[in-house]
Amino acid sequence: MRGVRAPAVLLGGGAALLLSLLWMPALLPVASRLLSLPRALTAMASGSPPAQPSPAADSGYVPGSVSAAFVTCPNEKVAKEIARAVVEKRLAACVNLIPQITSIYEWKGKIEEDSEVLMMIKTPSSLVPALTDFVRSVHPYEVAEVISLPVEQGNSPYLRWVHQVTEAASDPSTVPP
């Protein structure tokens, strides 16, 4: 990327590495693993196995088992129709509509700029393929944007609710916390 430099030297150990990577959120999981490396090496040298990361014992949430999927739509009407359908079909627990975003992209050799609505869809990661297939089948764009990111951490009751709502066949007593 023009105008962005990656850190060239690791000054000050793990703290400098973490600070230098804060501008790149996608690399934070890598940074956390790098910061735990000295503990793992020390444990190996002492003969004891390194501690394995695990979900919080009291939460029961498995990191990455919920995803936030993102879909852009040409207008609010289309976004609401798709949002309502994915929730009704239990492909998602919740959809937030973020209006009036500006998208700039290349399409068929031209730089385009459009006003769109962004859908932020919370769903179990296991349902992302079905969600993608459904969105593609009803979306007006020739190539619909459907991307997802795993949720590593969050409010445990909410993350459990995402699973409950999408797994329940038709239990009207399931309501958001």
Image (tube, helix red, strand yellow):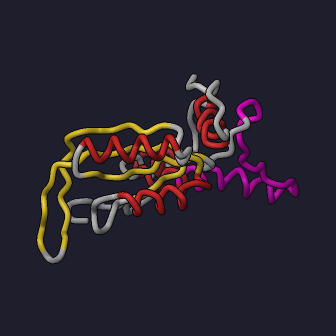
Please tell me which residue is depicted at 29% across the width and 47% down the height of the picture.
Answer: 78
Q: Position of residue 140 (x, y in %)?
A: 28, 60
Residue 38: say if magenta: yes
What residue span does the magenta drawing correspond to?
31-59
Please tell me which residue is depicted at 54% across the width and 61% down the height of the picture.
Answer: 129
Q: Quadrant of residue 159?
A: top right
Image quadrant containing the C terminus: top right
Q: Position of residue 118 (x, y in %)?
A: 31, 46
**Going by the image, does 153 lie left or right of 169?**
left
**Going by the image, does 87 lie left or right of 24?**
right
Q: Nearer the viewer, residue 48 or 155?
A: 155
Q: Nearer the viewer, residue 149 or 125?
A: 125
Image quadrant containing the N terminus: bottom left
**Going by the image, does 27 lie left or right of 74?**
right
55 up-or-down from 132: above or below:
above
Q: Nearer the viewer, residue 137 or 158?
A: 137
Please tell me which residue is depicted at 21% across the width and 45% down the height of the picture.
Answer: 101
Please tell me which residue is depicted at 47% across the width and 52% down the height of the picture.
Answer: 17
Q: Position of residue 61 (x, y in %)?
A: 68, 39
Q: Position of residue 36 (x, y in %)?
A: 64, 50
How many numbered discs?
0
Q: Quadrant of residue 143?
A: bottom left
Residue, far bottom: 109
34 up-or-down from 93: above or below:
below
Residue 30: say if magenta: no
